[in-house]
Image (tube, coloured by chain):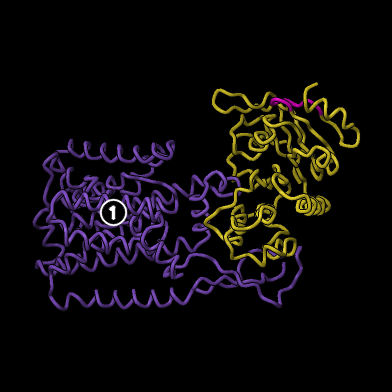
Amino acid sequence: MSTIETRGLTAHYGDFQALFGLDVTLRSGETTAIIGANGAGKSTFMKAITGLIKTAPDMIHIDGAPAGGRDAHTIISQGIAMVPEGRRLFPSLSVEENLLIGTHAKRSGPWSLDRVYDVFPVLKERRRLSGTSLSGGQQQMVAIGRALLSNPTTLLCDEISLGLAPVVIEELYRTIAELRSEGLSIVIVEQDVARAVRVADQVYCFMEGRVSLSGAAQDIALEDIRNAYFGI
Amino acid sequence: MTQPSYRIERATRSSTIGLAVLGLGLIGLLLLPLTGDRATMRLIVEIAYFLALAQMWNLLAGYAGLLSVGQHAFIGFGGYMLFALVAHAGFSPIYSLPIAGLLSGLISIPVAILMFRLSGPYFAIGTWVVAEVFKLAFFEVPALGGGSGMSLPLQAVRDIAPSAQGRELIIYISALAIAVASVVAVYALLRSRYGLALTAIRDSERASASVGVDTFRLKLGVFVAVAAFTGMIGALIFLQKLRISPVAAFDVMEWSAAIIFIVVIGGIGRIEGPFVGIAIFFLLRETTSDFGAWYLILLGLLAIAIMLFARQGIWGLIADRYRINVFPVERQVHLDDHRQRQASSTSLTPTSEKH
């Protein structure tokens, strides 16, 4: 189990500053929802946590130890895996190979190829097809399965419902809830505010690279979120 | 932990037939010296080292996504290291081949650290610049003949074998060995878990990093290994020629342009591609090179046509049309029906791999 903390997290794209001193705590075993409008810095935050954007060492702490600025593969080997926005499957690889690439983190744990196929049986049927030939929902399953095969303790899900049919979204969120019940820490970046708050233990609302609202999901009124979301 | 419950197979019918044909062809080539046809042997040596160079560049560009146009840096460097080892350190020419490769691998490490700061077209141009720097540097080394180059000392030539026929046989066998080793090495690498990661890097380096692939280390490893192999091939090339000069050793048209042409028209990102590319390149060269500039124009037009209309190369068209795969690197996983479903305690280590 990992508790991830950011302390005064900043991030830049060249001269453009995307994050302005974020203090966020992603508690072990909980589901955290990060919401906000487009350009609020949600995906940048996820990239910073997973090492895809370099930060100063003391801006990110994993279980109390500084972890900012580490390479992405090092972060994953510490048990933090991401399901990226847009799935980012590898077009040259089959479904199965896309899943197996997740084992490069070399972490031991409960997740195996068999178990991923148990959770997503449709992937087993289509394991020899190109990963990118699947429907959007099935591709999302591959992306989740690939992340799980690194045997993470924290799963970061960036916009997993984007562009998917409501029935598929329901299925994915059922799976997320099951993972949560097994003790996995989940972080969800989501545009669908109501859904995110429904599944979350705690909520952070970002606006223009800053935290505009945070707290336990049960204590936050949708009206407060709306105000924080739009900055009114 | 329960026992894992799947196995991985890769062999296909076409791969079995294809490898058998290649094996028979290799046996035929090994018997060729018995005919005493020295002109054909010299041609085969050239084909063999171009095949090895093309396999290396294919691994570098087609899999690791490192589009270098400066591989002639390591061809020339390897050649010069052979001459330096033989002429100034008294090494045997044949033993100097792997040492020249090793030294090329070592020099490629600082080159890689510098070049990996660049990407895309900047990386390509950067590698070309490095090759030019190598060439200019060897112009300034009088001990290696400076701008006019040097010949291999006569005694060293005799060390290879007392007779010209013996020397040609040794170089012929060495060239075949290097060509086979290049194909086997690339095939073995691509069938390993690193091959999967390399393919993923080719698709998207950023996405590969985000799923746990150590992209820098893997790319560095490939770059250094390819440089070492390329340097060893370069050493063999100039051992055959018995003479080296900066202009000949670091000639972009003679080496890198030809290698890129072979891989691109044959099929980049496929082990079979360089085989097809080699056949076309040498067929064109042997039949049209007397036409001077028109030969080069023809090569250029063919490369442009392939890039515009068949980006997977000629082998790509054939493989897709007839579903042929001589060197299958894709993993076909077979789940065992009787597997134990203790999902909470399975591991991902395969039970067996059928090769």
**Which residue is tagged 1?**
B302
- Front in this rendered view, residue B335 or B295: B295
Corner quadrant of residue B342: bottom right
Corner quadrant of residue B183: bottom left
Corner quadrant of residue B326: bottom left
Residue located at (72% from left, 65% from top): A121
- Front in this rendered view, residue B177 or B332: B332
**Which three-letter amino acid code belongs to the residue tagged 1?**
Leu
User: In the image, which residues are magenta?
Assistant: A207-213
Secondary element type, mark 1:
helix
Does residue B100 appear anywhere in the picture?
no
The quarter in which the N terminus of chain B is drawn is bottom right
- Horizontal side of B197 relative to B95 (left or right) equals right
How far across and how far down the image is residue A139, in percent? 65, 54
Residue located at (85% from left, 31% from top): A215
Q: Is residue A208 magenta?
A: yes
Residue located at (24% from left, 45% from top): B252
Looking at the picture, does residue A184 appear above or below residue A11? below
Residue located at (80% from left, 21% from top): A232
Colour of chain A, in one word, is yellow
Question: Which secondary structure is most common in the magenta stretch?
Answer: strand
On what subunit does the disc labeled 1 rest?
A: B
Q: Callout 1 environment at 10 Å: few (<14), some (14 to 19), or many (20+)?
A: some
Looking at the picture, does residue A139 appear above or below residue A46? below
- Horizontal side of B141 relative to B3 (left or right) equals left
Colour of chain B, in one word, is purple
How far across and how far down the image is residue B285, in percent? 19, 59
Does residue B318 appear anywhere in the picture?
yes
- Front in this rendered view, residue B191 or B242: B191
